[in-house]
Image (tube, rainbow, N blue to C red):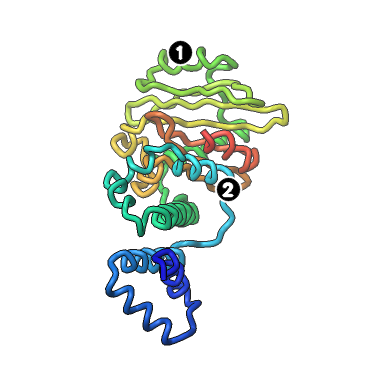
Amino acid sequence: MELNDLKYRVTAFVDGELTNEISKLELLQLIESNPELQAEFELQRFTKLITKNKCTFKPTPDSVKRRIIKQISPEENSFLRLFPNSKKFLSKPALAVSGVFAIIAILLFLIINKYSEKNDFNFAAEQNGPNNIFIQASTNFDNIIHGKLAPQILTDNPGNIKSFFEQNGVKYSTLVPQMENWKIIGAVVSEGAGEKFAHHVYSNKDGKLVYVFQVAKFYINKCQAAKLSNHLLNYLEAGNCYVSEAKGYVTLMKKMESNICTVVSNSSRNEIENLFCSK
């Protein structure tokens, strides 16, 4: 029997599709005596184990699908950058084709599962205290909605807002992105523990608001006025978006360049994720 046919039998064996006990015994003997079949057997068994233990069937948001596609980019050297020894490893005949697809499948399962586990975690429950930036952002947005907090400068020019931040003591580089269907309306500079922090607000034609509170990463947990749980901070540092909903508001956190940005809005979750998580 040709080697490729034996590999198909190995796959069927691992999947429990071989029912003839004599055939199974003969195949096991071949596996034990053939290094290539041993490698195929271990690879198939590992793939099945990972699939069983790690793959959870949950709907994946569009923003996550886009991120997964980027992470498994078909560029020739992207896989080799992740696994520098894979070229030599995959050159073995027994692994050249089935090995590549099995390993890519494993990576895809792990990526999706990693996201699912993290996305299901309630990071919001870890945040506490008035100096926590997640809590500050929620409180500030609530005050904006109820007219208790108003912009210190009214302008739709992002350059004017950046200049306002600089002139009023914000020491870190700030981001004021322009977003389709959203208009900048103003900004505020707050002070805490002797440091100045940047906030700006957008609105759309439906009267919905997007509030952005941005803090340079090097301030987080080093300045008493800018706290965040290390668990969530590490998650954001890894390039992830965190989104939660409470009291009819959507709160999103993401690292943008060198700043940790907290976004709060009374618009839809899908709208806010598309604005910030897809970039």
Indicate the secondary structure of the residue bearing disc 2.
loop
Q: How many tags in the picture?
A: 2
Residue in the picture at 57% in, 40% down: 273
Q: Is residue 38 above or below residue 223?
A: below
Residue 122: in sight, yes or no?
no
The disc, 2 or 1, on the residue closer to the chain's N-terminal end is 2
Q: Is residue 212 above or below residue 172?
A: below
Residue in the picture at 51% in, 12% down: 160
Foreground pick, 192 / 72: 72
Q: Which residue is mark 2?
A: 61
Foreground pick, 114 / 177: 114
Q: Is residue 47 above or below residue 12?
A: above
Residue 230: x %, y % from top left? 34, 46
Q: Can you tell which of label 2 and label 1 is closer to the viewer?
A: 2
Mark 2, other Cα within 10 Å: few <14 / some 14–19 / many ≥20: few
Residue in the picture at 37% in, 83% down: 25
Residue 26: x %, y % from top left? 37, 81
Instruction: Give amino acid for label 2.
Output: Pro
Instruction: Give amino acid for label 1.
Output: Ser
